[in-house]
Each structure stands twice: as C-alpha cells, then as structure tokens.
Image (cartoon, rainbow, N blue to C red):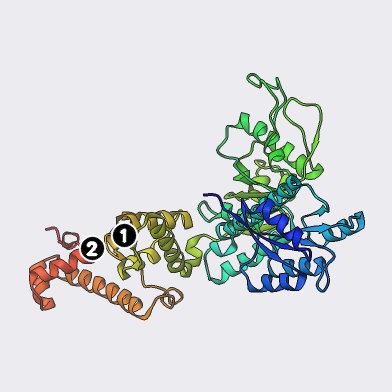
C-alpha cells in the first residue's frame, strides 16, 4: 500500500479547487479551502499537510500569508504557488520565502501532477535526511562519550571547541580510549557534518599500499593498476579524513601528507598533475609523536602540522569514577541489542569492574559487559559472568568518588562483600586453611562456611601450611 500524500488546495475560485481534486484525488487525499482564512484554520487545526497548493491573489489572506503560516508551523511542508499573473518577480519572491515551485494558470493537468509529486518527494526526502541527522547525532553525539569525571568534562569542552573551529586536530590516547568515536563526534557537530567522514587505520595497511590508498593512483602507476583510482583524500572531499594511528605512516608517505596539509592539494601515485582538495584532517595515535620526532621516526614538520589542536583522551584507570556510569551505559546498550532482560550489576560484579585496571580501556570494558550480558541468567550480572581476569583483580576498597555513584544499598553491599572476603582470608590464614576449625571459630556450620568461601572466591588450599 502506497503512502497517500495529504494535499491542501487553496483558491477562491471553486472550479480551480474542483479541478485539482480531479487531477490529484486518485493518488492523494485532497482538502479544499475557498480562501486564505479558511486555509489558515485548516493549518492551525493540524495534522500538518504534505503539500499546500495555493493561489497567490485572494481576498483576505493571500498566498504569501498562507506560505508564511505553513513555514512557521510545519517547515517540512512544501508549498506550490498558483497565479494567473505570472511574473519573474512574483516567482522569485515566492521561492525566496520558501515556496517549492509555482504553477501558471491555465495549467496542464500533467504539469500539476508532476510538480506536486516532486514537491511530495522533496518533503519526504527532507524528513528522511532530518531523521538520519538525528540518528547520527545519537550515534556520534558527545553524550555517547560517557563520563562525568573532571578530566572528561575538560575533554568535552575541547571536543565542542574543535567542532566549531574546523581545524586540524590530533587526538592522543592509549588503545581503546575512544579516539575514533571522538573524531566522529567532532565531524558530526562541525560545519562539514553533511559531507563524508572517511576513516582509515594507517597501521593496518601495508607500507607499499598506504600511499595509493591515501592519494590514489594513475593508470599504469604500478603492476596491476589497470585504471586510475581516487584516494581517500578525494573521497573525503568537503568532509573529514580521520587518520587513525598516524604514527605508523612510513616516512616517505609522511612527506606527501605534510605537503597535502600545507598546500591543500594531492598528487596521485604515477601522476604529474595535482588536485586541489578541501578536506579536514583529524589524526589520532597512541604514540608520543613528539618523542618519535625527536628520535627521527616521525617528521618534525608533520608533527607540528598535525599538532594544531591536540586533545588527549585519558586512560580509564585515570577516571575510575566513570566506570559505574560506563558499565551501566554498555549494559543498557547490549541488553537492548541482544534482547536480554538484564537490568544491573550485583555488588560483587561492580566491585570487580571498579577494581580492575582496564589496560584495554573503554573498549575492553564494553567487551566485558557485552559478554556478561550474554551469559547472565537473571536481571543482575553476577561477578562470575565477568571475564576471569576481571574477577581475579585485586579490587581494593572503592574510592569515595566511585562509592557515591552507587545507590545506598549497592554501596553497603559492596562494603559488606569486601569485609566478608577480608574476614574469611584472615580466618583461614590464622588457622592454616583448616575449614573445620575456621567454621568453629566463625560460629557456623562447615557447609555454610564452604558456601561463603565459594561465593567470595576464597580458596582454603591457598592458606594450607607446608611442613
């Protein structure tokens, strides 16, 4: 079933309204209005129309007043003007104020159908574009770079400023800190957001291919080059080129990259002509490029060309208070993606998450949470659902900045769990791992103590003394 467009026809001549009903009525839902005032009433009552076809000259409210009312209340609705007094001046004025097109009376029925169909197509295209833009904002928005720590608030401010300035940006940080996510957020909040965001990992391509990938090649430039091919600079024309792990580029390619940034032009491999490019470059690396330049492994001139607006993404261990927030964000994301009824973390699991050092940073945390969501049977993720290296980490007490992020009950449970684990370890240490004597000292049944030891991951064998 096709989607029938809602059309409002406005004309003070009844025969024109009837004619347009006959022309458009088979494929669209047509509402007629005998004058501008009645049209304004229809517009105010809603819902919005897809296309409004209105005469320009009418008593009372004229076509221009209808046009302005439409654009004020429903900006995506397209307006087609009709006039028997066609002139370039009137047409230009109507289009300048937002009209899609105009029809000159008397008009051909096929022309009416074509103009209205095109207006309806444009309206739907604009709505799809706006939906896509909102989706991209959700995917690439700064709010998806999760964190409320002081250091992350500073990062947010820099990212927003970088988006406004449209200059070269160098993002540094350890692997897994979210450098590509930050680059995409800068692009999608900048003035180039409607053009392409092209990303390439410079360390993932062989050295003999990276030059051709970046700058393209001419026909016959090398064996197998049967035709010319544009590079990523040309593909990103008008948009953003993200060079991930730029520190891995060979020195020979660094020379060409430096020239491309300086001259705003590139030369394909095997070509003698240059091509002007309008591309914003955002580079990222986990290396210390200043130290690499001093050691002769990275060109100093390129370093300063890239180091216009540096942004450092902190490792997760330096913003541990963000771990509960990040973990909750990823849990909600993957529970929704996989259709799992998981709603939170048991205190033991949260303690393990906060205590682990996360050498793989945010990426490792997300992978761990996704795995936990997949294997958890109940509404809360238990500690045993986490990867073994996270479970085995020495957590230490939760710092105050993390503790205050938890609900009261979870904070109390976390403190109780740690105290229980420390008590059991001290008890077995004193009694040489003897579970029977430990149960007597603790004032509980041996089976009950075994259950506690298993729950808190304390092994009696680790405390047995050798003769």
Q: Residue at x 57, y 50 (%)?
A: 286
Which sits in the foreground, 438 or 233?
Answer: 233
Image coordinates for residue 52, horizontal then vertical, percent = 71, 61
Residue 145 visible in the picture: no
Judge from the rendering whether residue 171 lies leftward or rightward of residue 277; answer left or right.
left
Number of dots carrying numbers: 2
Crowd band around label 1 with a 10 angstrom C-alpha radius: few (<14), some (14–19), many (20+): many
* Residue 323, image x, y percentages: 44, 66
Location of residue 66 (image quadrant): bottom right
The image position of residue 422, as x and y in percent, is 26, 72
Quadrant of the rendered image containing residue 169: bottom right
For residue 447, side relative to residue 59 (left or right): left
Neighbours of disc 2 within 10 Å: few (<14), some (14-19), many (20+):
some
Question: Left of 370 or right of it: where is 37?
Answer: right
Q: Distance between the residues labelled 1 and 2?
A: 9 Å
Residue 6 visible (yes or no):
yes
**Who is closer to the viewer here, 462 or 231?**
231
Disc 1, SS: helix
Residue nearest the observer in this picture, 26 or 93: 26
Kindly state the secondary structure of the residue where label 2 is placed.
Answer: loop
Give the residue displayed 77% in from the left and 45% down from the top.
278
* Residue 366 image label: none
**Residue drawn at 80 percent across, 26 percent down:** 272
Residue 325: percent from the left, percent from the top? 46, 68
Q: Name the residue under label 2.
A: 457
Residue 126 vs 433, above or below: the answer is: above
Residue tagged 1: 391
114 shown above or below 340: above
């Amino acid at each position: 079933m096709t989607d029938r467009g809602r059309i409002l026809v406005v004309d003070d001549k009844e025969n024109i309204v009837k004619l347009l009903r006959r022309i458009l009525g088979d494929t669209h839902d047509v509402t007629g209005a005998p004058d501008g005032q009645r049209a304004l009433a229809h517009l105010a009552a809603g819902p919005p129309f897809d296309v409004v076809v209105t005469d320009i000259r009418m008593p009372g409210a004229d076509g221009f007043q209808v046009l302005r009312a439409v654009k004020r209340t429903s900006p995506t609705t397209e307006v087609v003007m009709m006039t028997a007094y066609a002139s370039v001046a009137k047409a230009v004025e109507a289009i300048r104020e937002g009209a899609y097109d105009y029809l000159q009376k008397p008009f051909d029925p096929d022309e009416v159908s074509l103009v209205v169909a095109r207006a309806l197509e444009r309206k739907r295209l604009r709505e799809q574009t706006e939906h896509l833009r909102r989706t991209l904002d959700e995917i690439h928005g700064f709010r998806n770079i999760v964190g409320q720590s002081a250091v992350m608030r500073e990062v947010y401010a820099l990212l927003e400023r970088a988006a406004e300035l449209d200059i070269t940006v160098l993002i540094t940080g350890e692997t897994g800190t979210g450098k590509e996510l930050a680059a995409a957020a800068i692009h999608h909040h900048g003035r180039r957001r409607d053009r392409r965001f092209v990303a390439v990992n410079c360390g993932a391509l062989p050295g003999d291919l990276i030059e051709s990938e970046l700058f393209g090649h001419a026909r016959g430039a090398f064996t197998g080059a049967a035709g010319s091919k544009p590079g990523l600079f040309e593909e990103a024309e008008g948009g953003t080129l993200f060079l991930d792990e730029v520190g891995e580029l060979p020195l020979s390619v660094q020379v060409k990259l430096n020239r491309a940034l300086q001259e705003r032009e590139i030369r394909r491999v095997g070509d003698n002509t240059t091509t002007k490019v309008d591309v914003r470059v955002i580079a990222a690396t986990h290396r210390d490029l200043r130290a690499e330049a001093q050691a002769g492994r990275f060109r100093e001139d390129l370093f300063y060309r890239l180091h216009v607006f540096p942004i450092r993404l902190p490792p997760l261990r330096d913003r541990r208070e963000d771990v509960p927030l990040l973990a909750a964000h990823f849990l909600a994301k993957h529970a929704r993606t996989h259709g799992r009824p998981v709603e939170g973390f048991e205190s033991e699991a949260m303690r393990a998450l906060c205590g682990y050092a996360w050498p793989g940073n945010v990426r490792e945390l997300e992978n761990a949470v996704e795995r936990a969501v997949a294997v958890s049977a109940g509404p809360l993720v238990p500690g045993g659902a986490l990867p073994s290296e996270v479970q085995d980490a020495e957590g230490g007490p939760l710092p105050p900045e993390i503790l205050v992020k938890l609900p009261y009950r979870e904070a109390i449970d976390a403190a109780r769990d740690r105290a229980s684990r420390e008590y059991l370890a001290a008890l077995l240490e004193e009694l040489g791992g003897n579970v029977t004597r430990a149960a007597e000292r603790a004032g509980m049944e041996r089976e009950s103590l075994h259950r506690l030891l298993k729950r808190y991951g304390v092994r009696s064998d680790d405390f047995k003394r050798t003769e």
